[in-house]
Amino acid sequence: MGPLAAISIAIVLLAGARADEPLHKQIDRQIAAGLKDYNKVASPMASDAEFLRRVSLDLTGRIPPASEVRTFLADTSTDKRIQLIDKLLASPEYARRMEEYFDVVLMDRRRDAKVPGTEWQTFLRTAFAANKPYDELVREILSSDGADPKTRPAAKFFLDRDLEPTIVTRDISRLFLGQNLQCAQCHDHPIVDDYKQSHFYGIQAFINRTFLFPTVQDAKAVIAEKAEGEVSFISVFDPKKVSMTTAPAVPGRKPIGDPKFDKGKEYAVAPAKNVKPVPAYSRLAKLAAAITAAENVAFRRAAANRLWAMMMGRGLVHPLDFDHSANPPSHPELMTLLADEFAKHKYDVKWLLREIALSKTYQRSSEVTPRTQDVAEDRYAVAILKPLSPEQLGYSMTQATGLTDVYRADLAKNLTEPALQAKLAPHLGPFVRFYGTRPGEPEGDFVSTLDQTLFVKHGDQLRTLITPRPGGLVDRAGKLTEPSSVVEELFLTVYGRLPADEERREIGEVLRTTANRKAALNDIVWAMLASAEFRFNH
Amino acid sequence: MERCEYACGTNDHRIDRRLFLGSAAAGLAGFAGFNARASELAAAQKRMLVIFLSGGVSQLETWDPKPNTDTGGPFRAIPTSVPGVHISELLPLAAKRMHRLTLVRGINTAEDEHGRGATIMLTGRRTEPGIQYPQVGAVAAKLLTTSTQELPGHVQITPGGGSGFNKDDAAFLGPKFASVTLADGKPPADLLRPAVLTSDADREREALRQKLNAKFAQSRKSAQTEAYTESFEQAAKVVAKANAFDASREDPKAADRYGRHDFGRHMLLARRLLEQGVSFVKVSHTNYDTHHENFDFHIEQLGEFDRPFSMLLDDLADRGMLESTLVVVMSEFGRTPKINDRYGRDHWSKAWSVAMAGCGLKAGAVVGKTNANGTAVTEREVNGGHLFHTYFKALGLDPTKNFHPAGRPIPIADPKASAIAEILA
C-alpha cells in the first residue's frame, strides 16, 4: 500500500461512518481497526461449503441437506451468498429458529406453568415471521397482564416466573438492559461500580405493587396491581441500617413519580374480596415504555449485542449481561454503531441479521492459520467455533441421518414447515433433555457431560436415527458402489462439504476392505455425527 | 466462571501424568510403581457417605432416647461402648460401635416441611428465592474429586424411582458435579455398552471418530472442542469401570453380613463405590415418616438400618478408610416428642440429632443436649449451617472460602454459622 492510500484510509477511519455506507461495510472497517495489520493477519473468507453450513445453522437452526450443498457449490453467480442469506431469512425455518432461540433466552427452559409452551412459541414465531420490530415485541412481553386471551401468551415472561419480584427484576435487567443487577440486590454491586442497589429497586418498583390474581397457585392467574406500596431497601454494608426507597426508574434515568390522587380516588376498581383491583395509576404500565425508550441506550445495546452474539459466537459486550464501564465492549464504537443503527432501522431484526451475515467478519473462515493462532478471540481474526444448541444438534442429526428427507418425501405435496416440524418434534426431546440447561437456569459456559457422551455412544435414539431406512443416509449411500462416491455422499450429507482427497482415500479404504459394508457405513456415520466437526458450528 | 480457590487436584494431576508417563517408559516395573503411588493417593483422598433416613427418623428412638418420660415411648436406652453414653435399644449393633461415632444432639433447624427441611440438611442453607445452593454431594465432589478419578464423584443410591444423571443438585457448580442416581442400585441404562454394539464395532468406530477429530483439530481447536473430544475418553473410562456399580460382584458372605434386603445391598454397593474412589455417596433408606404407629415402624426400619450401618463402619475401619471417610446419618428433621393419638410422632425440627463418624471427628464424642423430655435444646444449639461447616472442616477443607459462579463470591457454607469445633479432631 502506498503512503497516499494509507493516508486516505486513515482519513476514512477518522471521519467515521459514511452515511451511505451499508452497515456490513462499517462492521468490517471497525473490526479491522481493532487489530494492527488486521487485513494481513485475519483468516481468509470461509469456503462456500463452510459458509453455507454456518449461515444455515445460524438462521434456520439446522445443517443444509446434501442437495442444497450440491446446488450451492455448483452455483456460479457472484452474489450467491447474498441470495442465500435472503432466502434463509424469508424461510419459515428462520421464524422457527428465532422462536427457539428467544424462547430459551427469555424463559431459560422453565417448565410450563401458567402459559402453555405452544401458545408462547406461536406468539414468538409469528412475531419473527412477521419481522415484528424487536422493541415492539419486548413491549408486548412487558405489558401484557394475561387477562386478554389474545395477549396472554406474551405474559409468560411474568406469569411463569410467578411474578417473583427478585427473579423478574434480575431477568429484566439481565435480558433487556444487559446488566445483571442480581448482585446489587443487597448492596451496591461489590465489583461493578456502575451497578447500584437503587438500580435494582428502581426496576423492582415497577412491579412491586403487582400480584397474581386470584392466587399464585391458580393456573389461570392474571396480573393485578395495587395502588400503594413502596420498595424499601437497606444496604447490608450500612452499619446504620438506613432504609431507602425509590420510585420506578430505569438505571441512569429519572425516577417516574406517582401522580397524586385524592383519598378514595386511588382505584378505578377498588379491592374487595374476589375482585381484581384496578388502580387509577399503574406503575407496571410504565415499564415497557421506560425500558424501550430511545433515551434508554442500554436497551438497544443489549438487543444488538444479543443478535451479534447469536451470529458471531460472542458478544461485543461479553458476557452479554455485564455491560458496564469497567467491562467495555471489545469494539466500543461498533457496539454504539450497531445499537444506534438497529434503533434507527426501527429494530428491524432481519435487517440487522442480514447486515451481520453480509459482513466479511461473519464470513471469515474458522480455520486457524499461523498468523491468527495467537490472536485473541475478541479480535475476530478468525471465525469463532459455536457449539450447536440442543435444538440445532437435534435437527442436524435428523437431517444428517436422512430422517428429515424421509419425512419430506412422506409429506410430498403436503410438505409445509409446520407439518415437517410436527414429525421432527418428537425426535428433539432427548436432545433438549440431555443438552439443555436445567429448567430456570440461564445458559452457561459450554460443558460436555458424561450423560451426553453416553447418549451419543450407547443411547438407542441415535442408533435408531442411523439405522438404515429407505431414503435414509445409510440406505442411500449403500446403493452407491464406488467407494469414492459413497464417501462423497456421506461428507456432503453429514459435514455439508466435499471430502478432502485424503479422506476420500482413507474412508474409501475402510469401505473397500470391510466384510460388512452396511455395518461399516453405520460406524462411519456414527463417527462423523460424534465428531467435533459435527458438534460445532464452524 | 472463576475457578474455586480449591480447584482440586490440578497440580496433583500434572504430577501424576508425569509420573505415569515416566513409569510407562520405564517398563513394567515402572508401571507397578505408578500403582503404588495411585493407592497412596487414594488413601489420602477424602470421601463422604451420607445415609439419609427419609421422612424424618425419630431422635427419641435412635440417638437421644428419653425413657421413662411422658415423651419417651416404650423403648429402653442401652449403654454403649462409650461409658455414660446411652442410645435407643433399637440400635444394639450401633451401640457397640459408639466409640467410632460422634453425636450431635442439639439440632434446631426450625423447618418442619419435608422439602425445605431436606434443603437445609443437604445444602446447609434455608430456601432462598433467586438462588439455589449446591447439595453437599456436589460440593464434596467438586472439592474432593481429583482429576485422576474416573468414576463420577457424586452418586446417590435410592430405594426406587429411575436411574439417571441429574442436573439440579449441583446448582451453580455445574452438571459435572450433579449426582448420578442408582435407583435400587442400578446404573443408568446408557452407562453399559448395549449388546447390539459389539466391542469390535465400538472400537472401530471410536478409532474413526478419533481420526476425524484429529483432522479437524489441525486447524480448528478451542477449549470447547477439546472438552468435547476429551469427554469421550472420560466416558470410555467410566464404561470400562462399570463393574464398580455392580454389588453382586461382592463376596456373598459380605452380602450375608449386611443383610439380604435392599438397604443391605445398597450399603454394600456404597462401600464398593467408596473403595473405587467415588468422592461422595448418599444412600437413602425409607420411610421414617411415622405419623402413625411410630414405634412399630421404627422397630422395623431401624432393624433393617442397624446391621448394614454397623457392618459398613467396621469394614471402613478394617480397611483403614474410616479416617479418610466422613459418615453422616441424617434426615429432613426429627419427630415430635409428643406422641399423637395414632401412636405416631409428627415432624419436629426444634430438637433433634445427627450421628456422624470417621474423618476428622472426635470418635465417641457427644455434643449438644436436650431437656428431660426432649422438647427443646438446652445446650450447644446448632442448625444446618453449623453441620455443613463441620462436614467440610472435618474433610480438611475451609468452608469459609468462596465459590465464584459468574464472578459472584458465594461462601461454601453459610457465613452466619460456623463449625462445631468441640467434635473436630
Image (spheres, rainbow, N blue to C red):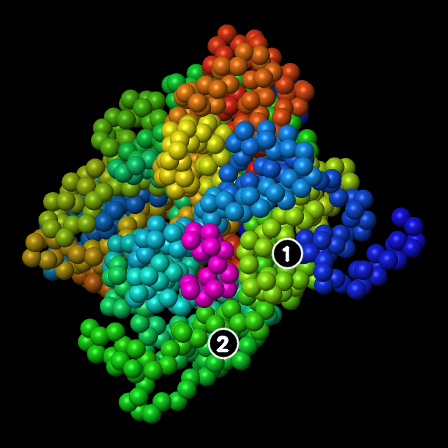
Within 10 Å of disc 1 (Cα), the crowding (few <14, some 14-19, many 20+) is: many
Using the rendered view, name the quadrant where residue B30 is placed: top right
Secondary structure, mark 2, is loop
Figure check: A394 above or below B411: above
Percent x, y of residue A90? 52, 47
Q: Which residues are magenta?
A: A125-141
Using the rendered view, name the quadrant where residue B116 is placed: bottom left
Q: Which label is found at residue A249?
A: 2
Q: Is residue A126 magenta?
A: yes
Q: Which residue is situated farthest in the left direction here?
A: B341
Figure check: B188 above or below B100: above
Residue A360 versus residue A156: which sits nearer the camera? A360
Percent x, y of residue A39? 79, 46
Predominant SS along the magenta part: helix
Residue B188 versus residue A374: which sits nearer the camera? A374
Residue at left 92%, top 50%?
A2
Residue B251 shows in this picture: yes
Residue at left 37%, top 39%?
A419
Q: Which label is found at residue A316?
A: 1
Percent x, y of residue B159? 26, 37
> Of the residues shown, which amino acid type is indicated by label 1?
Leu
Q: Give whichever of discs 1 and 2 has the lower sequence position.
A: 2
> Of the residues shown, which amino acid type is indicated by label 2?
Ala
Chain to which the residue tagged by mark 2 belongs: A
Secondary structure, mark 1, is loop
Residue at left 30%, top 65%?
A148
> Quick check: marks 1 and 2 in contact, CB under 8 Å?
no
Residue at left 41%, top 44%?
B167
